[in-house]
Image (tube, rainbow, N blue to C red):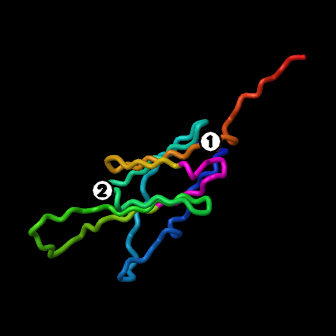
Amino acid sequence: MSDNTQMTERNESELARKSDDNVRRPTITPAVDIVEDSHGITLWADLPGVPRDKLEVKVHDARLYIEAEAAIPAQAGLRLRHAEVRAPRFARAFSVSDDFDTTKIDANLTNGVLKLTIPRREEARPRRIEVRAS
């Protein structure tokens, strides 16, 4: 990302939620790669074990929120007596500059990797200025 890009990470405490039993669940910050070009930003977030129905991506007040919960499948017919592995919860938030059109975000989840494409607004795209000689 260039120094001019206004997409910055937000404090995860903004995303902390309490579960139904009022116990704070541990939240994992997913690893994210962000690439910027003249067309916009592409963001890849690692969300292993997250099904599409447990993923929420939303934009509100120039902030992009990614929240998800992994699913750990239980074998049918087995009764759980002790568990040390819990389904991890993922959360991450970013500020998004006005240069980007958040109404046209494209989201795709494949094999535990979320790909978000955020296009740059047409008026914010670099354009070539023709210089005439007199």
Q: The residue under label 1 is which amino acid type?
A: Ser
Name the spot of residue 20 as percent of width and height, x first. Answer: 37, 80
Question: Which region is colored magenta?
Answer: 92-104
Q: Quadrant of the C terminus?
A: top right
Label 1 sits on a secondary structure element that is loop
Name the residue nearer the viewer: 5 or 117: 117
Q: Residue pushed farthest top? A: 134
* Above or below 102: residue 36: above
Report x, y in % for residue 110: 34, 47
Residue 40 is situated, as x and y percent measured from the top left of the image, at 58, 41
The residue furthest bottom is: 21
Residue bearing mark 1: 2
Image coordinates for residue 14, horizontal then vertical, percent:
53, 69
Do labels 2 and 1 touch, CB within 8 Å?
Answer: no
- Of mark 2 and mark 1, the one earlier in the sequence is 1
In the displayed structure image, the side of residue 128 where residue 56 appears, left or right: left
Q: Amino acid at mark 2?
A: Gly
Callout 2: few (<14), some (14-19), or many (20+) C-alpha neighbours within 10 Å?
Answer: some
Residue neighbourhood size for the residue with mark 1, other residues' Cα within 10 Å, grouped as few (<14), some (14–19), many (≥20): few
Q: What residue lies at 43% left-to-right and 46% top-to-bottom?
A: 115
Label at residue 49 = 2
Tell me where residue 54 sits by quadrant: bottom left
Residue located 41% across and 50% down the image: 114
Tell me how many marks there are: 2
Picture quadrant where residue 132 is located: top right
